[in-house]
Structure formats: C-alpha cells, structure tokens
Image (cartoon, grey):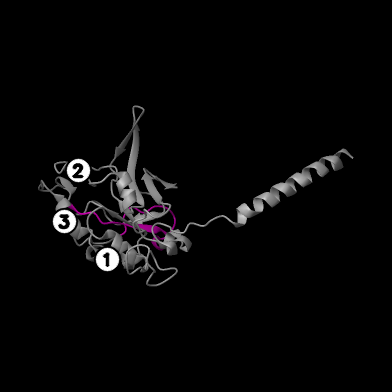
Amino acid sequence: MLAFSVLSLILPLLWTTFVAGWPLLWNRESPSVCNGRPELCRRRYSNITFIGAHNSYAFSEDPLALSRNQRINVSQQLDLGVRLLQAQAHVDDGELHFCHTIFLGCVWETPFSTTDSTFPCSIDRIQGPLLPMDHLYMINHSLNTNVFPIPGGAGVIVPNVFEAETTNGVKSIMDNVRGCAPFAMDKNPNFILLDWVDEGEAFLAADQLNGFTSPSQSAPATGGETNNAPARSRHGPWLAILTLGFGVLALGS
C-alpha cells in the first residue's frame, strides 16, 4: 500500500517533468553556422580541413623578435578563423611554461622545421597501432631559414617571415597537399599548420579543400562530404583544438 502511494506521487511528477522537457529536446536550435559555413555543421570532423597557428602563443609585433611565429595574438587568431592552436606546456618549479611544440596522438604529420620551400612530404611522428590512412593528418607548412649555417651541423633555424605571403599562398599550400596525397590515399589534410597566419591566402586554400569556391558564407562547389576547415568565423560558435604536450583539448562556445 505504501509503495502504491509513493508511486502515485512520483508518476505524476515524472510525467509533468517529461511533458515540460519534451519541447526542449525537440526544439533545440541547431547552430546556423559552423566555423564560418552552415554546410560544415553536418560534416564529419574528420572530413574538414582546419587552419592552425604554429606556436600560437609565440606572437610579437617586434620585427627583431626572431623566434616569434605569429604577429597577432591568440584571440586575433581565433577571430581570423584559426581552429588549431598549437603549444606545449611543461611545469617547472610549480610554474607552467610554454615551450616548443610537439603533436602526438592519432594524427600523423609531415616533417617540421624545413628550410625547403617545396615542402617534400613524408610521414613523420606517428604513433599507435593504426595505419596512416586511419589517422587524421597535419601538414607542417611553415618555412624556416638558416641564419647561421654551421658546417656539419644544423645551424640557427628561425621562421622565414620574408617568404610568409608566398608560403601561405594557395599555390604553395595546394602543392604541399598534392605531395602528401599518396601517403593519405588522396585524402586532404585535417590540419594545415602555419606561421604568420594573418599573411597569405591560407583560408582561401582551406575553403577550396573543403569544396567551396568563394569565401565563407557561400555555397559549396561540391556539397556534402568533401574533405575539408573553417573560414573566418566571426559569424558563429567557434571550435578550436589546443594541443598541449601529448594531449588534445577542444575549446568551444
């Protein structure tokens, strides 16, 4: 009898909660724009190319700062359309220090710190039991220059800011993508990692890799599941991937 009385009290309450919550379940408003494109909202994450900022934290407006990789800060990078923030953090004496970056996980990448503007492609830094074609992959498309060559050694390698506009141009990026195609079964890269993201035509290249023929907010050239990154997304929720040491952290709003 007691059990029946308890049920008689609980069941109406559950029913009221269900009826009140039903509109919330079915009337949830879907995002109208995802990373600058409404068409990307229904596309798989693995089938999109994102522009990334190499050493995103290493920004400076000082032209004498030879070790900088970016001219604009992280907030400006996100506003521009960058969706991969690369960094590595180490704790030293209880303080968090950002150091030179490394990206490990279910993503293979191309060689880094290259001084060759043709960006020869090969598989570098791959982990796990999966085959390369079962990974996401990232193109390290940042050009360096050797300012102090040492015979028999590497010398002093610094980011090549003077060639940034050419390096981040559509032709250079697309040539790199084509060179990597045989290693990825012709799949486009998921991430293109750049220095000086505010220079060149990287976002236009990403638009083309994602199947769009014009800047963000336009219709795709080939709808649905072409591979692949966002355009400048001041227009909607943003998604960024922050690489910290060996992990990947997704940020969103």
Real-space Cα separation, disc 2 to disc 1, in angstroms = 28 Å
- Which residue was labeled with disc 2? 61
Instruction: Give amino acid for label 2.
Output: Glu
Tell me what residue is drawn at x 73 percent, y 46 percent.
14
**What's under tag 1, amino acid-wise?**
Met
Judging from the image, what secondary structure is the residue with disc 2 in?
A: loop
| Mark 3 or 2, closer to the camera | 2
Q: Nearer the viewer, residue 23 or 65?
A: 23
Q: Are marks 1 and 3 in contact (CB under 8 Å)?
A: no
> What amino acid is at disc 3?
Glu
- The local secondary structure at tag 3 comes to helix
In the picture of the structure, the residue carrying the numbered disc 1 is 174
Along the horizontal axis of the image, is 35 left or right of 3?
Answer: left
Q: Residues within 10 Å of mark 1 (few under 14, many from 20)?
A: some
Q: Quadrant of residue 201?
A: bottom left
Say whether residue 23 is left or right of residue 115. Answer: right
Which residue matches tag 3?
A: 163
Percent of width and height locating residue 164: 19, 55
Q: Is residue 124 magenta?
A: yes
Q: Is disc 2 surrounded by few (<14), some (14 to 19) or many (20+) residues within 10 Å?
A: few
Is any atom of residue 28 visible in this view? yes
Span highlighted in magenta in the image: 123-144
Q: Is residue 6 above or below residue 218?
A: above
In-front residue for pair 88/167? 167
